[in-house]
Image (cartoon, helix red, strand yellow):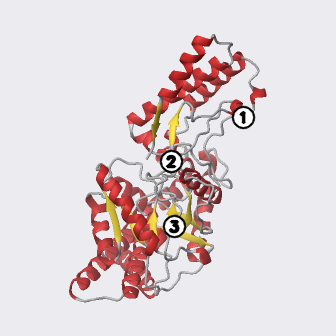
Amino acid sequence: MFKYILTVICAYISTLLLVFIATFISIVLGIQWGSIPHKYLQAVLFIQKIFAKFHCIDSEKTSTTIERDQSLCVLSRSQSAVSASDMQFQFDINKENALSIFDVVNDFASSGLQSIVQDDVSGLFSFSPAYVEYELTLPILRQLNNDIKLHIFYMLTFGFRAFFLFPLRLLLLSSSFGFAAFWCLIVYFFSLTKQRKTWIAVTYCRLFCAGTGVIAKYHNEDKIPKQPGIAVSNHLSPNDIQIICANVNPNRDYLYTVTGQKHTGIIWVIESLVERINKSIWFDRGKANDRQLFIEQIMDEGRRAGPVLLFPEGYCTNNTHVLQFRKAVFTDDVTIYPIAIKQDARFGDSFWSEDLFYNYLIRLLTSWAAVYDIYYLDPQQKKSDETSDEFATRIQLLIANAIEKPAALFDGSVWYKPAERQKYRNALQLKCAWEVSSLMPPTSDAKRKDENEHKKVTFGFT
C-alpha cells in the first residue's frame, strides 16, 4: 500500500515538473502552444454546461448585468466637471417627453427604485456577474443531491484546479520572478542592448501570464503601438501591463514605458524588477506634486519616444463598463494608441476585489483561466475643434465600443472617495430640483434666486 501511494506521488510530481519544464522552455524559446489552450477552454465549457442547470443559467450565453429601463432622466455630462449646469436629462434634449411635473417626478421615483435594486457604480467594483454565475462553488455541490457521478465529477474538477493548476501556476509565477531577478543581477555588471532588454521583459511577461493562467487572443496586430506616442487602455487588474507587453515582438529594440501607482508588498517587488529592465514611471497617488510631475514625465516621454503605456481610468473595474478617462494626456501634439481589453469572466475573473492580495492570488491561480481578447485600435490625434475633454471621451467610447461595453459617466473616485461621492450627490439633487422648478411658472425673484444657487455648485475631476 505504501509503495502504491509513493508511486502515485512520484507520478504526480513528475507530471507536474514535466509540464512546468516544457512550458518554461517553450516560452523562453518563443514556441507557441498552438490550438491547445483553446481546446482546453472548449473542455471547460463542456464541464460548465453539465452544471449549468444548477446555476439556472444558459451556458451558451455570457451573462451581463441587469438591464435597466431607459428612463427619461438618464444623465449625461461632460468630462471635465460635475455640476448642476453640467448635467443633462433626456428631457433636456427631448422636451416633448416632459409633459408635466407629475411625469418628471414619477420618472425620478422610477429611476430611484431602479438604483436601489442596482446602482450604476457598485456593480463595477465587485466580482464580474459572469464569473459569479459560472463558477463552481460549494452551493452548487449541495444542489447535486444524491447524484454520485456528478459529485465525483465535481470533486475531480476541484482536484484538478487545486492540485494541478495551482502548483503549476505557482511554479511558473515563481520562475518569472526568478528569471527577472537573474537578469537584473546581470544588468548590474554588464551592459545589455535594448533588443536584449526587450527580450528579457517580454519573456518575463509571458512567464508571468502563464503563471496567472492567461489565455489571450490579440486582434489587429498591425496597429500595435509604435514610437512616439501614448498607448491607453481600459484597466482590469494589476496584471494588465504584463498581458499587453507579452505580445510585443521580442526582437524589437523598445517595449513600452510602463506607468502606474507605487505599491507595497508583492506588487512593489514586481515594480522593482520591471524598472531594472525597462523604462518605467511611477507615482504616489497621495502626493499632489508627484501626480503633476508624473504627467509631465509622461507627456515628455510620449512626444519624443515611448510608447508610454497608460491606464487613464485610474482605477480597475470588473470589465462591465469603461470608466471616464482623465483628460491630462489627451493634448494636441501627441499620438494616442487605444488598446481595448475584454475579459471572458466565465473562466475566471482577474479583477482584484479581495481585501488582501494573497486571497486574490489564490483565487486567480485556481481559476480555470484568465481569458482575454486584446484589440489594437487605429491611432488617434486630437482634432482641431476638439477640447481635451472631448478627445478623452472619444477614446473612451472607441474602447468601450470595441469590447461592447457601456462607457460610464464617472470615474473610480465616485466609488473610492466619499468626498467626491457627496459632491456628485449634491450636484444631482440640485439638478433634479432645478428641472422640476423649471416646469413651474416661477416668480421673477424666485427665478433669480434659483439661477444664483445653480451657479454655485461646481467641482472638477482630475
What SS does tag 1 mark? helix
Image depth: mark 2 or mark 1 in front: 1
Q: Is residue 119 above or below residue 98?
A: below
Whether residue 331 appears in this view of the structure is yes
Q: Amino acid at mark 1?
A: Ile
In x, y percent, where is residue 393? 58, 52
| Badge 2: residue crowd in 10 Å (few <14, some 14–19, many ≥20) | some
> Height in image: 275 above or below 388?
below
- Residue at 58% over, 11% down: 445
Residue at coordinates 25% horizontally, 85% vertically from top-left? 186
* Left or right of 451 in this view: 185: left
Q: Secondary structure at mark 3?
A: loop
Look at mark 1 in the image and give the residue it sits on.
Answer: 93
Residue 61 at x, y = what percent?
68, 53
Give the residue number, with chain letter if any, for mark 2: 141
Q: Disc 2 residue type?
A: Leu
In the rendered image, the residue lying farthest to the left is: 189
Seen in the picture, residue 288 relative to 459 is either above or below; the reply is below
On the image, the x and y values in percent for residue 167 come to 36, 68
Q: Report the number of discs.
A: 3
Residue 411: image tag: none
* Disc 3/disc 2 C-alpha distance (Å): 54 Å
For residue 211, say whether it is visible.
Answer: no
Quarter of the image for residue 400 reads bottom right
x%, y% of residue 62? 64, 53
Q: Tell me the residue that label 3 is attached to.
A: 334
N-terminal of the pair, mark 3 or mark 1, is: 1
The three-letter code of the residue at mark 3 reads Val
Q: Nearest the camera: 363 or 14? A: 363
